Amino acid sequence: MTATTQRIAIVEDDRDVAEILATVLATSGYDVETFFTGESFLRSLPHRQPDLCLIDLSLPDRDGLGIVAELRAHKRIAAIIVSGRHELGDKLVGLELGADDYIVKPFEEKEIVARVRSVLRRMSAADSAGKSEVAHFSGWTADFRRFELIGPDKRAVALSGGEASVLRVLLESANRLLTRGELMDRLGLSADHTFDRSIDVRISRLRGKLEEDPRNPRFIKTVYGAGYIMVGQVRWN
């Protein structure tokens, strides 16, 4: 998929900011559509789905975090939050709801293009032909096409985009220690405090879904001062 065929939706009520984003991305070869309200964007999805959307958190009709959460139903749409909110809590919540990146205003135009390209590259790599999408381990099945875990009792548990990406990396490196730095590098995340904390939160949520006793994990073990290791045999198909 080339940049000229990739569609980007901008969900931003500040028309000056929206124009800057649209101009720089269109100049970089993307097909850009702008929405000034959350509702107009959500109404467009059944008819025209973008490959990636840039979402402001402070929209006039909706909280951008709610829109990010609703995009979980559209697994192939990437989301980058572009917001003036600097609080760590907003960043962590956004990432855990499934956002692929978080950019704080004011931003550099080159940064926007670089971060968009990085997320789209990760999506393209995940969709590459021949890559296995289902992993089986210790009675569990992780289906990365559906973003869900299926337990030994056949009960399905939904995964957020962030949880699925971390679980996939752990399963692909089963029985090998991964440092936080390696996890962040494999996930394409920048090495800052926000994303470092986000890894820990995602691990905690995965344990809550996988483990009988999350405080004494059987599968995702912590090697204190070093990182995490996924224990068990994994079969892919």
Image (spheres, rainbow, N blue to C red):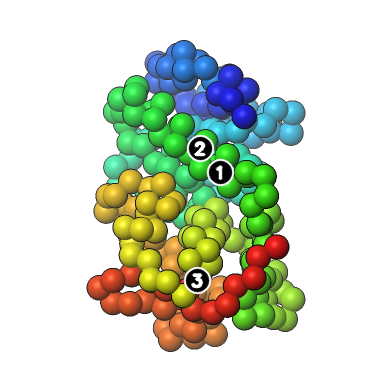
- Percent of width and height locating residue 103: 36, 37
Q: Nearer the viewer, residue 70 or 127?
A: 127
Badge 1 marks a residue whose secondary structure is helix
Whether tag 1 and tag 3 are in contact, CB under 8 A, the answer is: no
Dot 3 or dot 2: first in sequence order is 2
Whether tag 2 and tag 1 are in contact, CB under 8 A, the answer is: yes
Residue 147 appears left or right of 163: right
- Percent of width and height locating residue 202: 45, 63
Residue hosting label 2: 121
Q: Residues within 10 Å of mark 2 (few under 14, many from 20)?
A: some
Q: Nearer the viewer, residue 46 or 4?
A: 4
Residue 153 appears left or right of 194: right
Residue 125's mark? Answer: 1
Quarter of the figure with residue 143: bottom right
- Percent of width and height locating residue 118: 44, 37
Marks 3/2: CA distance?
Answer: 24 Å
Q: Is residue 87 visible?
A: yes
Marks 1/3: CA distance?
Answer: 20 Å
Q: What's the amino acid at mark 1?
A: Ala
Quarter of the figure with residue 158: bottom right
